[in-house]
Amino acid sequence: MRHLTANALLAFIVSTAGQAVAFEVATHRTINEAAAIDSASLDPFLVHHAGLARGLIEPLKGSQVIQWIGLGGVLEDQFQGSETLGGILRSSRHFHNPLLPWDRSGLDIPLLPRFESSVRWAQRADQGITGQAAWADARRAFFEAATGGTDSARQQSYADTFRILGQLMHLVADLAQPAHTRNDMHVLGDDLEKFIDANLQLVTGFSPFDRSIVQIPTADSIARVPVAHIWDTNRYDGANPPGGAASPTFGLAEISNANFFSQETISSLAYADPLRPLPAINVLDLFSVATYKTGENRPYRGKSGNGIRVDRMVAEGIFFRFLPPFISNFALDDYVLTEYASHLLPRAIGYSAGLLDYFFRGRIEIAPPARFAYGLAEYEPGNTGRFTKLRFKVRNATPGEDTGPGQLVALVQYRASVTGQSLVDHPFAPISSELFFAISEPIDVALGGAFQELTFDFSQSPIAIPTNAADVFLTVVFKGRLGLEDDAVMIGGKDLFEPSPIDHANVTDWECFLGVPYPVGDLVAYPSYVPPAQAQRDVNRDGLQDLVGPAALRQLYLKTFDLSQPAPVVSESHFDLSVPQQDAGRYSRVMVLQDQPFHGVAILARDNRLVASGTTYPIIRATAPSPGVYNHTVRGLSGDLVRRVLPSGTYRGLPFHAGFFTLLNDTGPCFDLTLTAAPALTLVAGDTPAE
């Protein structure tokens, strides 16, 4: 007989536990997606820090970010490939009574061990055969996504991150269902969940919690991350029901437990049950009559105090006035449920959005280094060079939360030239739809609130950062303690301009006189001026030398700088490009990574000699603005990616974006006449400074 009873009990559990879910599938998906849209930080975070240019509609493994979040809300009740078994084992952990200690606050079914509360389930390291979808699992997936080495792996890890977060948001939304905070298993389903699922237009509004509640330690051995206070702040003791302006300072379980009935927990007397002290019929003080949709005039009871004002808490049943006092005859009809939804759904959305905001709260601010350029690389023919190191400043920019020691990694994502053509020479050449990644060696760091300048080494990455890259985005990832959370992950992003060629060309082999250019670099045709035998440089034959070029520039230095700052003093120890000697008809180039739409370039040439005569001119100094090079994709009005390209110009066979040219006096007016002149400019290599 005992054996038969146990089997019967097991059959009862298997057949009914699947009903112990709160909101229905469509409702959970809708709440999650509404929360993602209403999150104050998620979409900007994705675009400006994670490098997901399309934000919430970024496709990841066939679904958009927002769809993964919505899917997580569905999967939490039917996880690990088995809708029946997964639903039973997971949904039984979706309860939390805030008037009990967290280790005893879960679903309590007579004759069975108490199930674990959702506040602990959300942070449990081992969730058993149903699979893992806890806070630490989302953190782990997020770190793998932020440091992923391939586009496919990164997409999968981000998809896992948002799916797991969607499952955690499901747990939060369940707290807005009073049955889940008042230990009502609702075996036959719940009127509120069915009603909302049939009226999804009610899933609207936004009521956030006070962010101070997630700045307090939990003192729990399992639910240690303060995100647990979204569930329960441990402030409601039964006598102080959350209401009015104070309600955002309570957890969502406290609000729903203290203020609303479920169908099976309509209490007659306040404080009769220590686990459900409020609300109760005997403390309802509002009375109204409304014409119900069936045409009858139906009486309603409501409350003006004891927490949140609710005009229609219950409807009186049709036989209420004919039954003895000890028999309850109250109902939660559609009018009551509509009012419940108006209070609970905005909180389900707002608190779920708050979970997303808390998860992505960590911010690292990135700023240019003292030298201005993040990266410098010598130019290689065909634009085949690499940036092996980046230097820039970082700081913890998370409001009100300090970091402990941790590791910092930099990652650069970019698109490649599909054909292998140089994007300087052919800026409109097709670029890959696939993203590529270069990852730095980790740095042990104590990240503080003040900027510190660090150098990140990419030389050991399987693919260092190519100078022939498009759509460049820099991310830094910190893993360590943040505020009260151990093993937090925080990131910062910066959309860098694409690798910029900074060119200096010595074009003194052509010289202008009275609007006509002359190829003075040809020293046979234009030898030194020694009249009367060598008078070719006296163009108008007035006995005076008219043409003096070409010139050789020695000890040539270029330095980029911030236009908002004074021009730097360029020297042998302060440069981005150093060229020992640049003869006429030559150019030198340095590839630069920087973050400004316009920046300055300072030029110094210490020794400038006229080749034909041997005359030496004094130091040449000059500064000029230069545009940042863009060849990237941005989110268009329709949400699709749109490519933006800065075209390059060409001078004497040299494609360039930022070209600086040394001319001879009076050559400027006919500079355009030499655009296609021969010979083509040829490269003379220079040096970049040692890191």
Image: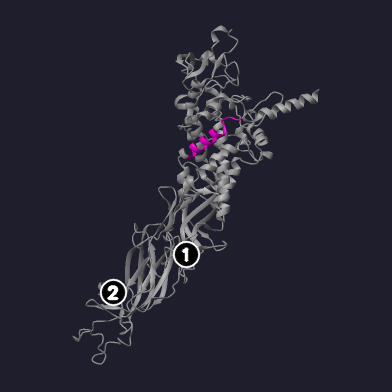
User: Under tag 2, what secondary structure?
Assistant: helix
Location of residue 450 with respect to 590 vertically, above or below: above
Location of residue 451 with respect to 600 vertically, above or below: above
- The residue at the far left in this view is 542
Residue kind at label 1, given as amino acid type: Asn
**Callout 1: few (<14), some (14-19), or many (20+) C-alpha neighbours within 10 Å?**
many
Location of residue 207 with respect to 648 vertically, above or below: above
- Please give the residue where the numbered disc 2 appears in the rendered image: 673
- Please give the residue where the numbered disc 1 appears in the rendered image: 468
Location of residue 535 with respect to 440 vertically, above or below: below
Residue in the picture at 69% in, 30% down: 14
The reply to whether the magenta stretch includes residue 566 is no
- Spot occupied by residue 467 in the image (x, y as percentages of width and height): 47, 64
User: Under tag 1, what secondary structure?
Assistant: loop
- Spot occupied by residue 312 in the image (x, y as percentages of width and height): 48, 19
Numbered label attached to residue 492 = none
In this view, the residue in front, 283 or 239, is 283
Residue in the picture at 23% in, 85% down: 538
Of the numbered discs 2 and 1, the one sitting upstream in the chain is 1
Residue kind at label 2, given as amino acid type: Leu
Q: Which picture quadrant has residue 619? A: bottom left
Q: Are marks 2 and 1 in contact (CB under 8 Å)?
A: no
Q: State whether residue 91 appears in this view.
A: yes
Q: Is residue 690 left or right of residue 625?
A: right
Q: Is residue 138 left or right of residue 650?
A: right
- Spot occupied by residue 145 in the image (x, y as percentages of width and height): 56, 50
Q: Which residues are magenta?
A: 21-36
- Spot occupied by residue 600 in the image (x, y as percentages of width and height): 35, 62
Q: State whether residue 230 appears in this view.
A: no
Foreground mark, 2 or 1, reads 2
**Callout 2: few (<14), some (14-19), or many (20+) C-alpha neighbours within 10 Å?**
few
SS assignment for the magenta stretch, majority = helix
